[in-house]
Image (tube, helix red, strand yellow):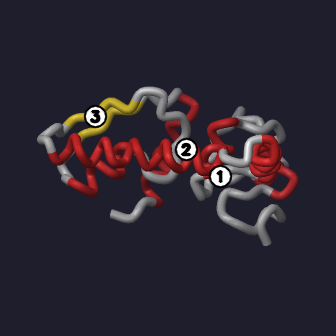
Amino acid sequence: MAGDGSGPGEVAGAEEAERPDWVPPGIDLSTPNMARAYDYALGGAHNFAVDREYFRAAKAALPEVQLTAQANRAFMNRAVRFMVGAGIRQFLDIGSGIPTVGNVHTWSSRRRPRTRSGKDWAAHLTRQRRNSEAEEPK
């Protein structure tokens, strides 16, 4: 059931002993994180109960916040597809945060497999990124 630690990316009580493999050491699972809340808004699996609670509170105050997040991601995906179609083969994804649904590298490589994407993920997110990309369908 959602929120009880049984779903993807969920940690019941966010205890250290139940830390998923994709979460690097040193990441506080008891404090909400905007990037993980954004991931939740997009339907991703890299978020926790505390992030979902945070997002639901934001949505109660700003009902359009989820549609805005989805529209933002849809625009980025259309822009990437357009650029790949125009012949651009290399992308630099600045401020990409944590891996979430529909990243630049996902859309560019689906459209043209030999595109290259650089990301500016922080060093502590490297393990999470690798594990997330390993889960993506090819």
Quarter of the rendering containing residue 8: bottom right
Front-most of residues 71 and 125: 71
What amino acid is found at the position of numbered circle 1 in the picture?
Tyr
> Which residue position is annotated with label 2?
128
In the rendered image, residue 120, in percent from the top left (x then y), is placed at 43, 27
Q: Residue at x 37, y 48 (%)?
A: 77
Q: Earlier in the sequence, mark 2 or mark 3?
A: 3
> Which residue position is annotated with label 1?
40
SS under mark 3: strand
Q: Are marks 2 and 3 in contact (CB under 8 Å)?
A: no
In the rendered image, residue 11, in percent from the top left (x then y), is placed at 77, 56
Q: Is residue 5 left or right of residue 89?
A: right
Q: Is residue 118 left or right of residue 18?
A: left
Q: Residues within 10 Å of mark 3 (few under 14, many from 20)?
A: some
In the rendered image, residue 16, in percent from the top left (x then y), is placed at 81, 46
Front-most of residues 91 and 20: 91
Q: Residue at x 77, y 36 (%)?
A: 28
What amino acid is found at the position of numbered circle 3 in the picture?
Phe
In the rendered image, residue 71, in percent from the top left (x then y), is placed at 50, 47
Task: Tell me the CA gap for discs 2 and 1.
Answer: 16 Å
Q: Residue at x 43, y 60 (%)?
A: 136
Q: Residue at x 12, y 41 (%)?
A: 87
Which label sits in the foreground, 2 or 1? 1
Task: Tell me the CA gap for discs 2 and 3.
Answer: 20 Å
> Which residue position is annotated with label 3?
91
Front-most of residues 137 and 94: 94
